Image: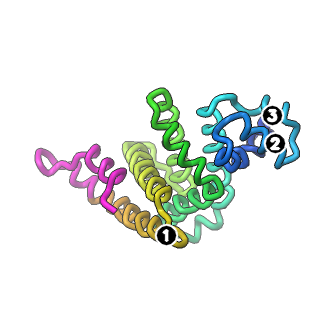
Amino acid sequence: MEDTPSPLEQIRRQLALVVGENAAFDGWTGAAVEAAAAAEGIDPVQARLALPKDAAGLIDVYIRGVDRALEATFPPERIAAMKIRARIREMVWERLQIQAPAKEAVRRVVAILAMPQNLALATRTGWRSADLMWRLAGDTSTDFNHYTKRLTLSAVYGSTLLAWLGDDSPSASETAAFLDRRIDEVMQFERFKAQWSGSGERRLSLTRFLGRLRYPPR
């Protein structure tokens, strides 16, 4: 059973997503923390103690908040009624819906995480989120598949996030179609792995495959 979070951790969790919503106006700064605390009725001094002072730290807290919200949205009984393709597709889509109130702030997240000093954080958070989605989907692999599934899903989610940030279509219909195409490619993964087990020219490059997922034609 999960340990009861400390008072500061409880505040951190309560403010995680709200900070993102305010970061759309105030940036990933202390001003966003204070605005979030005011919106939630939390002492600003406690809020400042609970949350990191730097943008990268605030972004990490926000992404953890998205992960927790996603997990709450997909309880075991909902997962059990879905096929594997639907599980992964709906989780990626739900992540976008959770972030919709903070879309402009998420746009800044992409720019901040692309900075050289934040590449380790970008890699860590991307892996963590992909791992969560696969675990929620019921994946229990521990071999090479464990890593390739998470690398592939990280690429799919990253490319879909970029498509969503640039999508002004009604109900993000262009992003939905884009995501469906990417998920179809993931579902072909077993066939691709069979080709990887070949030799010479028949062996498919994992790097090229992941690059196609992250930077596919629209």
From the image, state whether disc 3 or disc 2 is nearer to you. 2
From the image, state whether disc 2 or disc 1 is nearer to you. 1
Tag 1, which secondary structure?
loop
Q: Residue 171: x, y in percent?
A: 55, 71
**Residue at horizontal 63%, vertical 67%?**
78
Query: CB of mark 1 within 8 Å of CB of mark 3?
Result: no
Q: Is residue 217 left or right of residue 151?
A: left
Q: Is residue 214 magenta?
A: yes
Among numbered discs 3 and 2, the one appearing first in the sequence? 3
Quadrant in the picture for residue 60? top right
Looking at the image, the residue that sits furthest to the front is 25
Q: Residue 71: x, y in percent?
A: 64, 54
Camera sees residue 87: yes
Camera sees residue 65: no
Range of magenta residues? 192-218
Q: Is residue 13 left or right of residue 105?
A: right
Hey, what amino acid is under mark 1?
Ser
111 or 189: nearer the viewer: 111
Q: Classify the position of the N terminus by image quarter.
A: top right
Residue that label 1 marks: 169
80 or 55: nearer the viewer: 55
Q: Is residue 187 magenta?
A: no
Disc 3/disc 2 C-alpha distance (Å): 13 Å
Disc 1/disc 3 C-alpha distance (Å): 40 Å
